[in-house]
Image: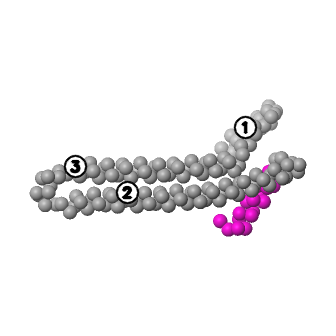
């Protein structure tokens, strides 16, 4: 992300914070944006580490699977097949694949959890409206939704 894009995002968030809290709380909005910028840096650094680890795990799983497969293919003579039945090799390959998938899922989930926590911290939840819409306005909105669908 370029510096201009980052500045644009910061200005946008500052405008949102200013509108949400009013001019009295501009200092508070600036402090929140500063902490958001720090969190952004932390997220990018941590996500980069996780993604590198994910790639390393995938590579390790692929190498492990290749080694088991190569071991099986390398022992094609009847004597080795007698001591190492195809079912055993098949089970080892399946176990390796399952381990690889499990590690991949763990890494992917940790990436999503980190990103979700980052977004929730950076963008506070919007408070629920204090008033309920008038019945006519709600009916018009429902009508627009059904017409659009």
Q: Sequence-wise, which precedes: disc 3 or disc 1?
A: 3
How many numbered dots are placed on residues in this image?
3
Asked if disc 3 and disc 1 are in contact, CB closer than 8 Å, the reply is no
In the displayed structure, would residue 25 be above or below residue 57? above
Q: Secondary structure at mark 2?
A: helix
**Image quadrant containing the C terminus:** top right
Give residue 142's mark.
1
Q: Is residue 125 left or right of residue 49?
A: right
Q: Which mark is residue 61?
A: 2
Look at 32% across and 57% down and name the residue there: 65
| Tag 3 near tag 2, CB within 8 Å | no
Q: Residue at x 75, y 63 (%)?
A: 8
Query: In the image, which disc is placed on residue 30?
Result: none
Percent x, y of residue 78 = 11, 58
Q: Which mark is residue 88?
A: 3
**Residue 103 shows in the view:** yes
Mark 1 crowd level (few <14, some 14–19, many ≥20, 10 Å Cα): few
- Residue span colored magenta: 1-17
């Amino acid at each position: 992300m370029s510096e201009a894009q980052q500045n644009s995002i910061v200005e946008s968030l500052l405008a949102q914070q200013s509108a949400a809290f009013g001019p009295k709380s501009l200092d508070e909005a600036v402090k929140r944006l500063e902490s958001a910028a720090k969190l952004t840096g932390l997220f990018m650094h941590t996500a980069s580490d996780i993604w590198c680890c994910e790639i390393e795990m995938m590579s390790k799983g692929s190498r492990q699977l290749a080694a088991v497969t190569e071991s099986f293919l390398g022992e094609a003579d009847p004597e080795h097949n007698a001591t190492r039945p195809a079912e055993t090799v098949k089970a080892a390959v399946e176990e390796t694949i399952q381990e690889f998938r499990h590690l991949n899922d763990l890494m992917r989930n940790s990436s999503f959890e980190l990103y979700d926590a980052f977004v929730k911290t950076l963008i506070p939840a919007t408070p629920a409206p204090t008033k309920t819409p008038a019945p006519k306005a709600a009916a018009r909105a429902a009508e627009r939704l059904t017409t659009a669908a």
